[in-house]
Amino acid sequence: MYIIVGLGNPGKEYEHTRHNVGFCVIDALAETYRINVTEKKHKALIGKGMIDGKKVLLAKPQTYMNLSGESIRALLDYYKADEREDLLVIYDDISLDVGKLRIRKKGSAGGHNGIKSILAHLGHDEFVRIKVGVGDKPEGGDLVNHVLGGFCGEDREKIKESITLAKEAAVSILCDGADQTMNLFNGRK
């Protein structure tokens, strides 16, 4: 079973924030493939289903961003999954322009607290991830307010498009592998 995790924060007040882009991609996958992501297990909302003939588990950790690794570790242990082969994590990245995607098979946290937590719980950095660009904070702005804020104007349209693109990239990773997907999607807007 392939585990696809979108990072975010639980609660209505965080629903459409930059930090919840991962949740938005999971919601898009769930809607397209009719997977109900409502079961509460392993500190997450999860849903099982099929995407292009492959068994998947979609998950939205409910631990808040900084503790995402707790939920992912519990999911991997319960389903006896190998994170190097069976895990995809989708999350926001302030170092990328709004709407830009970057797919990696390993790497550092780059300052992202959710990824720091995952790295700490896995003990290594080898898992596939899709980073969705949400843009850097404005000059002199506060990072927390930026990532917990919503999108305005043309950025709102760009992020809708990038959520769809990230959904397509997730399916491509599942069906065609990370290497081929990286060639197709990295840098696309």
Image (cartoon, grey):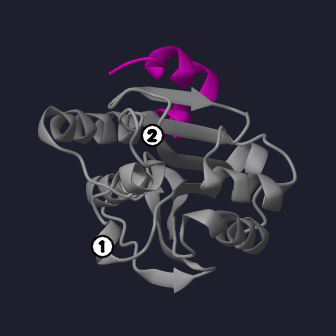
**Which residue corresponds to the image point at 54% horizontal and 71% vertical from the top-left?**
64
Residue 168 appears left or right of 179: left
Task: Pinpoint residue 25: horizontal percent, then vertical percent.
Answer: 37, 50
In the rendered structure, find residue 171 and report the number of the disc placed on it.
2
Side (left or right) of 120 relative to 175: right
Outermost left residue: 153
The quarter holding residue 14 reads bottom left
Q: Nearer the viewer, residue 44 or 142?
A: 142
Q: Is residue 25 at all visible to an observer of this figure?
A: no
* Quadrant position of the N terminus in the picture: bottom right
Question: For residue 76, what is the image quadrant?
Answer: bottom right
Q: What element carries label 1?
A: helix
Q: Residue 27 carries which label?
A: none
* Image position, residue 74 (x, y; %): 72, 73
Q: How crowded is mark 1: few (under 14 residues within 10 Å), some or many (20 or more)?
A: few
The reply to whether callout 2 and callout 1 are in contact (CB within 8 Å) is no
Pointer 1 residue:
13
Give x and y (percent) for residue 99.
33, 30
Q: Is residue 18 magenta?
A: no
Identified at 22% across, 33% down, the residue is: 158
Does 157 sit above or below residue 22? above
Residue 101 coordinates in the image, percent (x, y): 44, 28
Q: Is residue 121 above or below residue 101?
A: below
Q: Write down the quadrant of residue 120 in the picture.
A: bottom right
Residue located farthest toward the right when viewing the structure as drawn? 123
Foreground mark, 2 or 1, reads 1
Marks 2 and 1, how far apart in space?
A: 29 Å
- The magenta-colored residue range is 170-189
